[in-house]
Image (tube, rainbow, N blue to C red):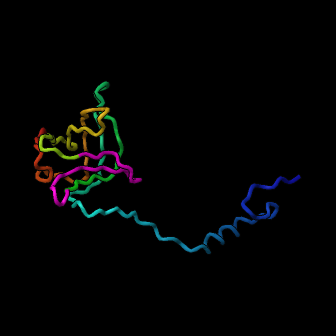
Amino acid sequence: LKIPAFSFGSNPMQTQSGEQNAQEDEDMPKEAPSQVLRADDGDENELFESRAGIRRLDLATRSWKDLGKGTARLMQHKSTQAKRMIVRNDVGKVVLNFKIDPKMIFTQKKRGLAFQAITDPKLGLQTYLLLTKDQLTPDLLQPASFKSSL
């Protein structure tokens, strides 16, 4: 007794050899890799973009919790000049998004930039570490304060 394999629409009793399947795959037209397009609302200018890792300080264990890697962008609104930092993972999901306040203090560490921000009102003030591939300069973060602790 021969049990037919599951198939979508073809006769399950007919099987093709591996060579026939390979030939069909080669005959299929090759697709160009798709490029991810970013939404541009026209209200903001991009001041900085870099590959980055983001970590949050866990107060209970006093260790850094990895929030993932992605693309960090520093954006500035065209009319109000307000700045914000947004970090998206490789899929495009927002990992971190906050407005840069003049009272914020950014501290340059050996491995990145440390700062405190309220990203979720339920959690309150959290300490983050942004590890960027390219150096994020203090003048881009103005009017916020910048310290070096190297």
Q: Nearer the viewer, residue 126 or 53?
A: 126
150 over 49 or under it: above or below: above
Spot occupied by residue 68 in the image (x, y as percentages of width and height): 36, 44
Q: Quadrant of residue 26?
A: bottom right
Spot occupied by residue 31 in the image (x, y as percentages of width and height): 51, 71
Q: Give the residue displayed 21% in from the left and 37% down from the top.
A: 116
Spot occupied by residue 69 in the image (x, y as percentages of width and height): 34, 47
86 within the magenta span: yes
Magenta region: which residues?
77-98
Q: Give the residue displayed 68% in from the left and 67% down from the top.
A: 21
* Residue 41 horizontal side relative to residue 17, left or right: left
State the quadrant of the C terminus. Answer: top left
80 over 128 or under it: above or below: below
Residue extending farthest top: 60
Q: Give the residue displayed 31% in from the left and 24% down from the top.
A: 60
Residue extending farthest front: 79
Spot occupied by residue 18 in the image (x, y as percentages of width and height): 70, 64
